[in-house]
Image (tube, rainbow, N blue to C red):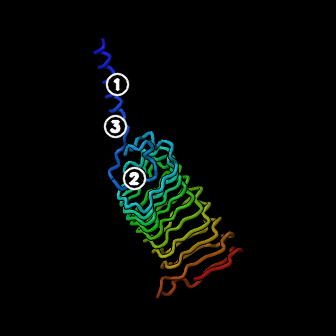
Amino acid sequence: MKSIAILLINLSLYLGVVDLKAQSINFPDEQFKAALIAQGIDANGDGKIQKSELTQIRKLHVNNADISSLEGIKNFISLEELAFLNNHLTTVDLEGMQNLKYVYGNNNKIKRLLLKGCINLEVIFMNQNELSVLDLSGLAALRDIRINVNKLTSIDLSKKTKLERVNLFRNQLTTFKAEGSFELKELDLSNNQITEIDLRPFSQLRDADLNGNPLQKINVTGLVALERLYFEPPIFRASAITQFNTSGLINLKEYKW
């Protein structure tokens, strides 16, 4: 009987160790893991990170940490705010992270940003990256998007009923699509390749910067909330617009063209 008891105890201990190992998360990027441990996420100090240590974390900033991969990030199941500024990331996969609200990833080398299923995402900052395409379909909670100095050739911001601010300057956009996003208040599309734009659907628009585009046609009539409007041509180029209709712009304080 004693032998059986000892055997059962040893088996329990073994299973406990196996279970503990099973709960340890693999972070292939050692710099990412080191950044997490430096923030005290390794609560028990064993040099490993268990799932149980991540379940309650809602805010994570791993800026300036020399990170090349965020693999393992999806184990932060309660995460609402994520920042990874000034690293070396090229791909960021956040698909299915339903609690995420704020994502800040300025100054990386990101070419692929995967956000499918991030249904509560409100804010995206991705300035100074290398994005040429970005799928934002299904992200109805978005209200603030800043993806300046990238390589976007197109972007669809349609049916974003809470969207108020869009900053996309210095990309390669030829059109702007945001059908049904009627709450837009601030728009910066400066230094792109847009030739025609109709801003009339955005009745709440207050600020619009289209400087540096080769615009040939612009329509802003009736935008009673509009206060500032800029659409000067690219440097060293004459404007193709010879007439500008300001009817209905009763609150316009400043415009340059």
Gap between marks 2 and 3 measured at Cα: 25 Å
Q: Quick one: 52 or 217, which is closer to the camera?
A: 52
Q: Residue at x 62, y 65 (%)?
A: 185
For label 1, the SS is helix
Gap between marks 2 and 1 measured at Cα: 38 Å
Which numbered disc, 2 or 3, marks the residue closer to the eye? 3
Quarter of the image that includes the N terminus: top left
Q: Mark 3 or mark 2, which is nearer the start of the sequence? A: 3
The answer to whether residue 139 is seen in the rendering is no
Q: Position of residue 20 (x, y in %)?
A: 37, 35
Gap between marks 3 and 1 measured at Cα: 14 Å
Dot 2 crowding, Cα within 10 Å, few <14, some 14–19, many 20+: some
What amino acid does circle 2 point to?
Answer: Asp
Q: Residue at x 64, y 73 (%)?
A: 221
Identify the mark at residue 89; answer none if there is no mark: none
From the image, tell me which residue sits under label 1. Answer: 12
Q: Position of residue 236 (x, y in %)?
A: 46, 88
Q: Mark 1 or mark 3, which is nearer the start of the sequence? A: 1
The answer to whether residue 88 is seen in the rendering is yes
Position of residue 155 relative to residue 76, above or below, is below
Dot 3 crowding, Cα within 10 Å, few <14, some 14–19, many 20+: few
Q: Mark 1 or mark 2, which is nearer the start of the sequence? A: 1
